[in-house]
Amino acid sequence: MTHFHTVANLRSEEGEIIDNQMTFITVELAKFNKQVADIESDLEKLVYTMKTLHTTEPTQYPAFWNEEWLKRAIDELDTRKMTPEERAYFARVTAANAEAVKAEKQKIREAVEKKEVESITKALKGGKLSVEEIAEYNGTSIDVVLEIQRRIAGV
């Protein structure tokens, strides 16, 4: 296998490491020829990303590009090549998307809560289960069931 990277430290004339906190890693992208199926380490994932990101079609993204640390790196690379106007637009779109996701999550929470209230109401009106059983069956607290019971009674 061809080695595609070198790890180096600064050394004195006597061969002693001058500073063990400073390490240099040199990557030779031209020597990296692994296929996606053969990539195992995080270093290989990163080098593959560096070598192919600009030429890969969105439908061909390798699965490991969904790993959080690589997604952040790719996003950073994408925003660095933007003009200030493009970055501002990107920030606005990202904020709008975040708000849309937040609103959608709220709708889902409300739908789940509505379904829960309907289920509890139906169980209370059926009169066959205790408040404790209804709470357990619906995965909620007894207080929630009692509150819905008070609403039904008009109290």
Image: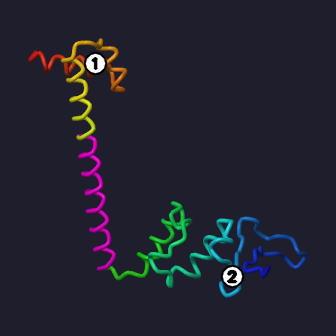
Q: Are marks 1 and 2 in contact (CB under 8 Å)?
A: no
Magenta-drawn stretch contains 123: no
Determine whether the residue tagged by mark 1 lies in a helix, strand or loop: helix
Query: Residue lying farthest bottom?
Result: 30
The label shown at residue 118 is none
Q: Tell me what residue is drawn at x 22 percent, y 13 percent.
A: 127
Above or below: residue 16 compared with residue 27: above
Amino acid type of the residue tagged 2 in the rendering: Phe
Of callouts 1 and 2, the N-terminal one? 2
Q: Residue at x 69, y 81 (%)?
A: 32
At 20% across and 22% down in the image, what residue appears?
Answer: 148
Whole-percent x, y for residue 99 in the image: 26, 56
Depth check: give the residue in front, 55 or 118.
118
Taking the image as shown, residue 91 lies to the left or right of residue 16, namely left
Looking at the image, which residue is at 45% across and 75% down?
A: 59
Identify which residue, 103 or 129, lies in the foreground: 129
Mark 2 Cα within 10 Å, few/some/many (few <14, many 20+)?
Answer: some
- How are the residues colored? rainbow
Image quadrant of residue 155?
Answer: top left
Q: Which residues are magenta?
A: 85-110
Q: Residue 32 has which mark? A: 2
Question: Taking 85 as reference, is 10 left or right?
Answer: right
Between marks 1 and 2, how big is the CA–CA gap?
A: 62 Å
For the residue carrying disc 1, how many other residues have a C-alpha within 10 Å: few (<14), some (14-19), or many (20+)?
A: few
In what quadrant of the picture does the N terminus appear?
A: bottom right
Q: Amino acid at mark 1?
A: Asp
Q: Is residue 103 above or below residue 36?
A: above
Q: Verify whether residue 92 appears in magenta.
A: yes
Q: Is residue 51 left or right of residue 143?
A: right
User: Where residue 28 appears, x then y in whole percent?
Assistant: 69, 84
* 134 relative position to 149: left or right: right
